[in-house]
Amino acid sequence: MDIKRSEVYRYLGYGRNIPDDKVKDTVEECIDLVLNVADMKSIYRIFDLSVNGDIIEIDGHFKATSKNLSKNLTGCESIVLFGATLGTGVDMLIKKYTKLDMSYAVILQAVSATVIEEYCDICQREIEEKLSKEDKFIRPRFSPGYGDFSIENQKMLVNMLECQKKIGLMLTESLMLVPSKSVTAVMGVSKEKKDCHIKGCEECQKTDCAYRRG
């Protein structure tokens, strides 16, 4: 797995700047620790999709409203529901160092956030490869909380994917994923290749975020 150091530094607040050697060395230590304890698991399922204006209907019964997502899904006839986690070991590692060395724990948090995104990218490429054999293409990953796609939609994703049973991923009453280093997302499936690669920071409307790219 190719962990982008620049992403770790961004999560740490360095922006496009490079940290000093001490921080860089600690980042390398934390990458080794996280990869050693991570138990990466993922799941995905493909459902029929209907888009009518801002209304997105999945599998004929679940409906969500999102102008941003409906634009992303234009021309798609099906949708990938996706979930991934690094497992409880990473949470336990961060909790341990929160008590021992808070600065170390902060770097572990940044590394873990980078690792889960890279893992999701790997999973997405595998899904893309499978669907390409059917002459189908997928759109960028889009998670609850991006743009106007409500965080409430975590419930739908976790339930329809049976995340707790399949990969040990649960949702709290406050809509937080447990283990914390986890992701749920949707990806549109289309018969036509479309340049629509806006994701993450570029799609999110929170322009004052300290961790925003570019």
Image (cartoon, rainbow, N blue to C red):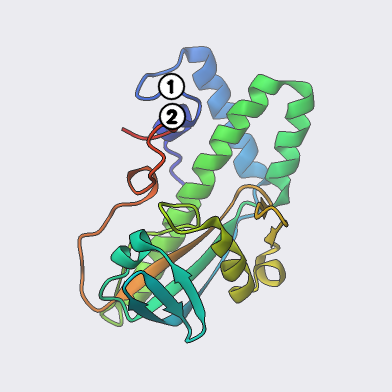
Q: CA distance from mark 2 to mark 1?
A: 5 Å
- Residue 145's label in the rendered image is none
Asked if residue 6 lies left or right of residue 158, the reply is: left
The picture places residue 100, in percent across and down from the top left corner, at 78, 23
Q: Secondary structure at mark 1?
A: loop
Front in this rendered view, residue 64 or 72: 64
The picture places residue 142, in percent across and down from the top left corner, at 42, 59
Mark 2, Cα crowd under 10 Å, few <14 / some 14-19 / many 20+, is: many
Q: Residue at x 65, y 23 (%)?
A: 104
Q: Residue 195: name its quadrant.
A: bottom left
Q: Residue at x 21, y 75 (%)?
A: 192
Asked if residue 175 lies left or right of residue 192, the reply is: right
Asked if residue 168 lies left or right of residue 200, the reply is: right
Front in this rendered view, residue 145 or 3: 145
Number of marks drawn: 2
Q: Is residue 15 above or below residue 206?
A: above
Q: Secondary structure at mark 2?
A: helix
Mark 1, Cα crowd under 10 Å, few <14 / some 14-19 / many 20+, is: some
The picture places residue 165, in percent across and down from the top left corner, at 71, 71
Front in this rendered view, residue 137 or 174: 174
Q: Residue 51: name its quadrant.
A: bottom left
Q: Is residue 27 above or below residue 126?
A: above
Quadrant, the C terminus: top left
Q: Are discs 2 and 1 less than 8 Å apart at CB?
A: yes
- Residue 10's label in the rendered image is 2
The picture places residue 124, in percent across and down from the top left corner, at 41, 62
Q: Amino acid at mark 1?
A: Tyr
Q: Amino acid at mark 2?
A: Arg
Q: Is residue 160 above or below residue 13?
A: below
Q: Is residue 162 above or below residue 100?
A: below
Q: Which residue is mark 1?
A: 14
